[in-house]
Amino acid sequence: MCTVKQLHEDMLIRFIAADADLTLLWAAAVGKRPGVALRQKVVWITGASSGIGEELAYQLSASGARLVLSARRENELHRVKRKCLELSSLEDEDILVLPLDLLDRSSHREKTDAVLQHFSKIDVLVNNSGRSQRGLFLNTDIDVYSSLMELNYLGTVSITQHVLQHMIHHGDGIIATVSSIAGLVGAPLSSGYAASKHAIQGFFNTLRTELTDYPNITISTICPGPVVSQIVHNAFSEQVNKPLSNAGDQYHKMSTERCVRLILAGLSNRVKEMWIAQQPFLLVFYLWQYTPTLAWYITSLLGRKRVQNFKAGLDADTAYFTKPKAKTS
Ligand SMILES: NC(=O)c1ccc[n+]([C@@H]2O[C@H](COP(=O)([O-])OP(=O)(O)OC[C@H]3O[C@@H](n4cnc5c(N)ncnc54)[C@H](O)[C@@H]3O)[C@@H](O)[C@H]2O)c1
């Protein structure tokens, strides 16, 4: 017989081991499977050349979804396509490589038309392209803030507008956008990135309320914590064209494979907001949602340490978890 104490301990262990919000974990455990819900669907992934977008392409193709792969580097997209074909029973024409610069908003109508010409429909758009930021506000050019808004916010909104028109006509579809924990929570050294992701959250939360006459169109925001990818390597520094000097270690981050498995569970079950993070980051989501005062206190402590580490030239991310070592080079 299970005692109340054992039950509490069991719940605590499950919460510590959890890496997504309860709705998403529920969907992953007992919901529709991607191989059923997404099979033969046409899924357009932006930012498919690396990180989360690349892994989305692999897992979606293995689930039988037909794909549009977009990013700026065509050769990288062809590499991803070749691997998708190896992993699946898809044919060459089931995967369209469509180079796209999200910043070139004047091309978005033409790109959407190209997808429709090839597949006649778009079932799912995954707005995944994005760049992050490392830098203190007072040392950062305003151009960096403008670039972050242009890419993460306006580029995403623009492509969404074109695809949504088609989905309204069709009466069905999913627009899923990879936001971030920084879309809900303040993230020191990433004020412009957090602002762009907060903008995304506000935009899509409002758009969802404008689409209540279209119950089969789902607006989904995906909020990951740290995940293995090229995101820090590609992040903006204090100046638009200056690469980041210390991209850091990724050992403490969630695997790309696990993050994408959860995203697919969310898409298959049309989950509207997904929180995906290992502890202690998952706890941060809950604290910000339910106990903001405590969240402010903890974020200030962590933020202070993060800023101090960054100023000392240390890796801002891993310094949370390790005794910081001075940079060797
Ligand atoms: N990795 C993380 O820790 C993490 C956490 C939270 C949210 N995210 C979000 O996940 C998404 C994917 O990032 P990632 O972690 O895989 O990083 P990544 O750098 O590996 O991939 C980013 C992708 O976006 C593409 N991209 C960049 N600029 C573009 C442009 N102008 N036009 C078209 N495509 C462009 C890149 O080519 C690449 O394919 C981003 O929106 C990011 O903000 C990542």
Image (cartoon, grey):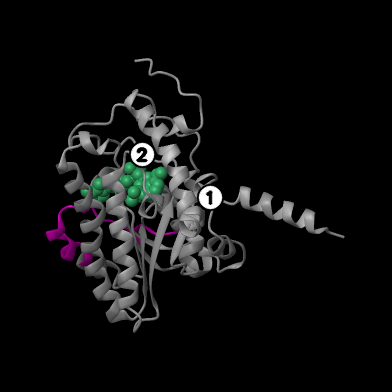
Q: Mark 2 and ligand 1: say if the CB distance to the nearest ligand atom is below 8 Å.
A: yes
Image spot of residue 91 (x, y percent) = 39, 59
Decide: marks 1, 2 in contact (CB < 8 A)?
A: no
Q: Mark 1 and ligand 1: say if the CB distance to the nearest ligand atom is below 8 Å.
A: no
Image height of 241 relative to 11, above or below:
above
Q: Is residue 181 left or right of residue 258?
A: left
Image spot of residue 29 (x, y percent) = 61, 62
Report the quarter where the N terminus lies: bottom right
Image spot of residue 240 (x, y percent) = 18, 38
The amino acid type found where label 1 is placed reads Leu
Q: Residue furthest bottom?
A: 213
| Circle 2 SS class | loop
Question: Can residue 49 be seen by looking at this rendering?
Answer: no
Image spot of residue 162 (x, y percent) = 22, 69
- Circle 1 or circle 2, nearest the eye: 1
| Residue, disc 2 | 230
At a point 83% along the width and 58% down the height, the residue shown is 3
Q: Which mark is residue 266?
A: none
Range of residues picked out in magenta: 89-112
Mark 1 crowd level (few <14, some 14–19, many ≥20, 10 Å Cα): some
Is residue 211 part of the magenta span, yes or no?
no
Q: Residue furthest right?
A: 1
Earlier-in-chain disc, 1 versus 2: 2
At a point 48% along the width and 63% down the height, the residue shown is 266
Q: Quadrant of residue 94?
A: bottom left
| Residue, disc 1 | 283
Q: Quadrant of residue 170?
A: bottom left
| Circle 1 SS class | helix
Q: CA distance from mark 1 to mark 2?
A: 25 Å
Report the quarter where the C terminus lies: top left
Question: Can residue 141 be seen by looking at this rendering?
Answer: yes
Q: Is residue 41 left or right of residue 119?
A: right
